[in-house]
Amino acid sequence: MDGIKKHINATKDKEHAKLLDKPEQFLYQLSQIPNFSQRVFCILFQSTFLECITTVERKIVILQRVCKNVQGSESVLRVLGLVLAFGNYMNGGNRTRGQADGFTLDILPKLKDVKSSDNSQSLLSYVVAYYLKHFDEDAGRETCVYPLAEPQDLFQASQMKFDDFERDLRKLRKD
């Protein structure tokens, strides 16, 4: 843009200035618009803001729905109760574990790695089988209802990081 302005200023003859090619003439005419760069920034911001805010809002709605579903689910409480009961039973009398009662949430993905003595099933599969046998009357029937939020919502919520939310919101505030 500066090169075009220098060319125009160097050639005081306005007829000679028209020797610019069409793209350069277009850019020169744009540069003559007052506050052009600020106007372009505003137009771009208006066109992208709604999309950005909608993306953040959609993520928050999914996270809220999953949290509400998990917090209000009797099935989740029962499964966690089974994990607690079986874990406490397995740790009972174990000197290295100090007969620890309770568990932290980071143990849940590891339930599939805890195997029975004959290696035929995992603790996770045992918990599921026990739950289905004792707490779910509709197990195996068409009337059986999945007790949690939609699996894709659960997966998306599990992949969300609060740092990403903060970064997105900071970017929106900055712009």
Image (cartoon, rainbow, N blue to C red):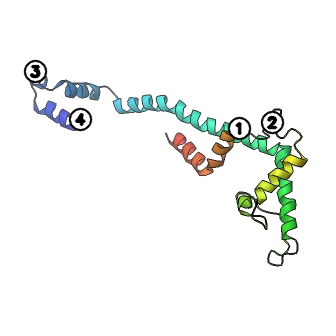
Residue farthest to the bottom, as pictured: 95
**Tag 2 secondary structure:** loop
Looking at the rendering, which quadrant does residue 64 occupy?
top right
Depth check, mark 1 against mark 4: the one in front is: 1
Q: Amino acid at mark 4?
A: Met
Mark closer to the chain start, 1 or 3:
3
Labels 3 and 2 touching (C-beta < 8 A): no
Q: Amino acid at mark 2?
A: Val
**Tag 4 secondary structure:** loop
Q: Which residue is mark 4?
A: 1
Residue 71 vertical placement versus 144 (above, below): below
Q: Which residue is mark 3?
A: 15
Mark closer to the chain start, 2 or 4:
4
Mark closer to the chain start, 1 or 4:
4
**Tag 1 secondary structure:** loop
Residue 130 at x, y percent in the picture: 86, 52
How crowded pointer 3 is (Cα within 10 Å; few <14, some 14-19, many 20+) is rated as few
